[in-house]
Structure formats: structure tokens, C-alpha cells
Amino acid sequence: MFKNTISNLGRIRQVVEVLVRYGFEDVVTSTALRRLVSSKRRLTWQHAERPVFETTRWERIRMIIEELGPTFIKLAQALSNRADLLPQPLIDEFEKLQSNVPPFPVALARQIIEQELGQPLENLFSDFEEVPLGSASIGQVHKAKLLTGEEVVVKVQRPDVQEKVRTDLSLLHELVRLTSGFLRKQGLANPEDIVDAFERSMTREMDYTSEARNLEQFRKLYEQYESFYIPKPFREVSTTKVLVIEFVAGCKITDKAQLQAWGLNSEKVAETGMDIYLTQIFEFGRFHADPHPGNVLVRPDGTIVLIDFGMVGKLTKQQKYAFAGVFIGMARQDARGMALSFRRLALTSDIPDMRAFESDLSDLIEDFSTLDVQDMSMSDLADALQEVIYKYKLQVPGAVFLILRALVILEGIGKVLHPRFNTFEFVRPYGARIIAEQYSPENILSEAEYTGTQLLALLQTFPADIRQIMRKVSRGDLRVKVELSGYLLLLRKADQLVSRTIIALLAVAFLLFSGLSLLGRYPTTMPYYRGLPGITWWGLGITAFLLLVLLILGTRRERKA
């Protein structure tokens, strides 16, 4: 850890200066970062000749991210889909981030391809265009033609990008370690987990074989669909740093003029595209997570093509049912059903006040139920749902936010092509279909088989587990780890309870003694009062005294409370 801090010291100081420059001195002065910068190095708080404090705090956070570079931009873009972690104003700013990166020289691209595939470029492609089709922070894309004649696109990873990303990820871990206390006070409960998840995502994105697998899986799922096409990956000429994919000619789905020139009905294209996407979510539970217009193409025959499968979302069967239940509960104006679906969807269902949660969902339903179909907006609904998720700190699967974001993008595309486009009209029949699937005999039988299998596994392992516990008990090896919070108060209360219990037991004992003393035979010297022997009166007196002590202790406790 110390070694990492030393190696990242220069970069950390640069990050600290950027924070100070944009008016986030509290992040520095409230954390261990304050030791890494002197007052002389604090720069003027200006941005583009505009005083920083004329901007909002959320805008300044975006400015910081833009200045820190591509890795931080990609982290912010990933967080823009997590409304359970960040407030909506910050998400709005993160959505403005664009990681426009200039292309690297084609000579380097050629060199990387030849090193990865172990052959000269001429032995792989009959043609290779030097001007890239596009460029991003991880790599860039060139059009080419294989020796067999197929037109392809070649994704080439940037030189040394893996080392740069590893350095920035190490820096992110170090920054989170230094500022974790401050971040938790700001409401970010698990900053370390966020960086870990982002690291896994970046690792997958830098491995092009992962995208190749996604393409092959989607091609298999949709091999019978005539209106939908996924490009073919060429695995034999692809590696972790080079990906060769079939080139597909077409126009952007929002190019209405071109669609009309080809004689295609733009409204039909919008409806087909929406049906394809909802099929991915509600039937297969596996969906293309970035359907912006540049990634959705249309062929002259009307076939819709999805490209760039670097980001794919997944839902389990139970998550799929729960997510559909949220929309079904809203359509039925059933706040309780909607709340229960949210609880099933959440990874942790610890909602402190279910009544308040249902009340907020009821208000949401009321707001949208009064709108005409033409006035309903998926964007507004997504914002409202994300506000509820953030307010109650629900940990829902990340795929849910990808779906909401994708539905908003698709609604925008639909409204360009279809004047009466309404997302809810498309979702409604899928909701009914999901209910039929969820309660179908096949699914009920499947759930029963799963439950039976789990119960059988428990019964099989239970005797062995009990024997293992008993062996540890007999050897004295059984240890129980208990962590107490506020244990001093608990010990005081336990001590008070034990003391009162002892007094009460003594009072009962003396009362029983008094009763039994009536059965004894005493000498003539034993004094009697009102027909009772003196020893009985002594027992009753001690009992009364002990009860008085209990009464005083109880009264004193009430006064303290």
C-alpha cells in the first residue's frame, strides 16, 4: 500500500490541485489529501475565464472529471447509470461527458495487428483503410477487406492503454482509501465496491474476446429473426487487443430521409426496433445496453442491425419478473404491488418504512395516471423511479438502470420516426406476457423443482454439518464470533436486570419461607402475634423490604428515562 502511494504521489498531487482549482477545497482539507499539497501550489479558481463559483457544485464535479482524463470520464459515464448511488443533478452532468479522443497513427495500428496475429498485414487483409472510422479512449476502428473478400471492421486497442488504465485504477483505489470517510459522509456508502465494479467492467472492455462472445451469443438467440441482424465476429483473426467483425452497410435509424428514399415506413421501423429491444429484455433477459442512434443501423430492406456489443446487460429470470412487476403495478395503480416488486428486485430489501415507501409510489402513480397518453414520457418516469431508488437507497441490479437509460434513448429515436410513438403502449403487452409466463404450469413446476432440489441438498448436508459441529464442541474447538455495537449501554442494562432479578428471587424465596414457617412446631418461647409465629413475621417483613427496593429502583429508572 505504501509503495502504491509513493508511485502515485505525483498524479495524486495533480488530482488534488484540480480539486482545489474547482472549489472543492473541503474534499482536500477534510481528508488525508491535505498533506499532499501546500498553499503555494493552490491555483486560481477560474475555469475558461469564468469564476468557478458562478457554476453549480455538480458542474464543477463534471469539469474535474473532464480534466482528469479518459479513465475518470469512463467511470463517471458508468456512474451516470446508477441513480441508486448519485443524485439526479450529478447524473445529468455526467451524461454530458464525451470522451472524444484523437486517433493514434495508423502505423501503430498496423504494428499492433501484426504483433497480435503474428503475420504481416498483407497476409490478413487485401485492403486496409488508413483513415479510421471512429476513435475512442480504448481503441479505434478501421475498415478492411479479408483475403476471402468479406468486408470487415477492425477494432484495434490503443498502445499501452492497459498499463495506463491499470495506473489510473490503482490511483482510484488510493484516492478512495484516502477520502473514504468524506465520501461516506456525502452519502456514498460503498465507494470501494464502486471502484471494484468499475475495475471489473474496464477489464472486460479491454478484452475484445468478451465482445466477440457477446456477438456470438446474440447471433444464436436471434438466428430465426428475419427483421434483426447481428454482425458476425471472425474469431480466427481476433485477439484480446484486435477484433474483426463483419462490416454491415446501412444508415442510422434516425436518418428519416434515407429511410423514405429506400421506400421504408419510418413508423414501422420504429415499432420493429422497439419490439426487438423489449424482446431482449422480457424474453431473453439479455440486452444490448447502448442503443444510441450510431449503434442502431437499418439496411435498405428494413432489417435492423445492432453494432458495438461491448456493453451488454443481463437479468435473471426472477429479476425479469420483478422488473416487469414494477410496470404492471404502475399500470394497475397498485402501489403495494409495485413496492413488493421493488423489494423482490432489490439486492437488499431493507426499507425502514414500507408505508412511506408505498406512499411515495402512490404519489408517483397518481402523477402519471392523470396524464394523457401523448403527454407520458419514459424520460420523466425513469427520473421519478430513480429518485425513489436514490431516496430509499435501494440496491437494485445495475442492469435496471441500463434498461431505463436505453428505454429513454429508444423513446427519443421513436419520436423522431413516429409522431404518435408511446413507449408505454409497447411495454403493456409484454407485461401481460410476463404474467402469463410467470404463472405458467411449466414455470411453477420449474420453481417447485428448484425448491425441492434446495431442500433435498439441505437434508443431505444437515447431518454432516451437525456431526461436524458436535465434534468441534467435544474437542472444545467451537468458537463464536460476536460483534457488539453500543455494548456498554447493553452491559449496564444487563447488570440492572440481573440485580433486580436477584432481588425478586430473594423476595419470592422469603415469601415461600414465610408460608412454610406456618407448618413448623416451635417451642413455647416463640412469640406469636395475631396467631402467627414471630419467624413468619420476620420473613414477611424481609419480603416487603425487598419489594420496596424493587419499587424504588423502578421509579428511579422511570425518572432517568
Image (cartoon, grey):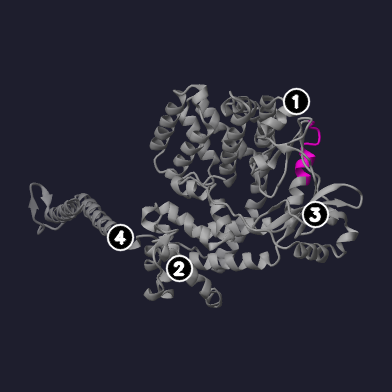
| Secondary structure found at label 2 | helix
Number of the front mark, 2 or 4: 2
**Distance of label 4 from label 1 (alpha carbons):** 78 Å
Sequence-earlier tag: 2 or 1: 2
Number of the front mark, 4 or 1: 1
- The image quadrant that residue 239 belongs to is bottom right
Where 219 sits versus 178, above or below? above
Relative side of 102 to 78, left or right: right
**Distance of label 1 from label 3 (alpha carbons):** 31 Å
Residue under circle 4? 489
Give the class, few, some or many, for how many residues have Cα within 10 Å of label 1's Cα (few <14, many ≥20).
few
Percent position (x, y) of residue 410? 61, 35
As shown in the figure, which amino acid type bears the numbered disc 4? Leu
Q: Which mark is residue 263?
A: 1
**Distance of label 2 from label 3 (alpha carbons):** 42 Å
Q: Is residue 448 visible?
A: no
Relative side of 170 to 57, left or right: right
Q: How many marks?
A: 4
Sequence-earlier tag: 2 or 4: 2
The residue segment tinted magenta is: 216-226
Relative side of 521 to 381, left or right: left
Give the class, few, some or many, for how many residues have Cα within 10 Å of label 2's Cα (few <14, many ≥20).
many
Residue under circle 3? 129
Give the class, few, some or many, for how many residues have Cα within 10 Å of label 4's Cα (few <14, many ≥20).
few
Percent position (x, y) of residue 175? 49, 66
Where 280 sits versus 554, above or below? above
Membership of 448 in magenta stretch? no
Q: Quadrant of the N terminus?
A: bottom right
Membership of 225 in magenta stretch? yes
Residue under circle 2? 16
| Secondary structure found at label 1 | loop
- Whether residues under marks 1 and 3 lie with C-beta atoms below 8 angstroms apart, the answer is no
